[in-house]
Image (cartoon, rainbow, N blue to C red):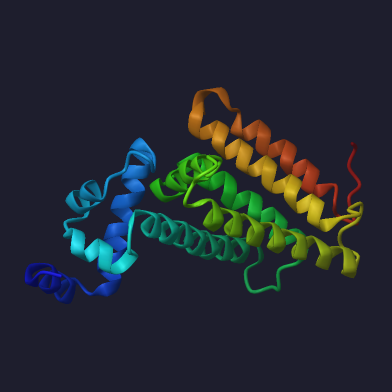
Amino acid sequence: MDRSAEGRIQEDGEEIAEARILAAAAQLIAEEGFGRMKIGGVCARSGYARSVVFQHFGDKDGLGRRLVEHAVEEFTNVYSEAVAARTGAATATPMDMLRALLDIIFELIRTMPTLNQAFLVLWGDAAAEYSGLRGALTEADRRFRFAIAQTVASGVADGSITGVHDPDSYASALLAQLRGISMQALIDPDGVDLRGLRTELERGVDRLSAGFRGSL
């Protein structure tokens, strides 16, 4: 690493340097996709030398994998905030957690922050057979499905959720719906009725409640 790069890191700090590089990468991925993103572009947008990027992430795929991890970390934080917003000081029930999940997903779809957009672009790119990020995105989705399944299984166990025979399959189906809506909103925002979609998904979640008395 050259002296100017080293000095910039010492001035900004390691965490700030990483955050700025990740933000630059997310912007470029959202704009042009991971395949077209160049390390030189990340350097130009972040203000850091190539040596700094390589020191932190190793290579382009390493940068992409870290961005996936960062997106998951940020989602975990905002989801926790959504749960707290629904429950306050009370202990969240499994139904609270599922409803909070819809709250935050639809808020992210509505606002489509750059990091969320970049994650969706990376997820689409992972369908390519030789994607270097498929493993990271597969792991992220498996963890997401597992968390949903655990929430549902907890509700089944305490009697607050009924009608679900396989929490793992329910989690896969719910994630498929949420991810599909997210991708549609990204590609064709004017062609997706988010309010109507949210209403339908909320009705579906409400029907899981043991106390549900509405009509089907």
What residue is drawn where x is 87% and y is 62%? Answer: 160
The quadrant of the image that shows the N terminus is bottom left
When the figure is inspected, residue 66 is found, relative to residue 103, above or below; the finding is below
Classify residue 23 as left or right of residue 205. Answer: left
> Within the image, what quadrant is residue 67 found in?
bottom left
**Image position, residue 12 (x, y; %):** 19, 71
Residue 140 lies, in percent from the top left, at 58, 58
Q: Of 174 and 68, which appears nearest the observer? A: 68
Residue 59: x %, y % from top left: 33, 58
- Would residue 116 appear left or right of 191 to someone viewing this image? left
For residue 147, side relative to residue 80 (left or right): right
> On the rendered structure, is 86 left or right of 59?
right
In the displayed image of the protein, which residue is found farthest to the left?
Answer: 4
Task: Name the residue at 89% across, 68% down.
Answer: 157
Percent of width and height locating residue 134 = 54, 51
- The residue at the point 55 percent across, 23 percent down is 191
Q: Quadrant of the C terminus?
A: top right
* Above/below status of 143 relative to 178: below
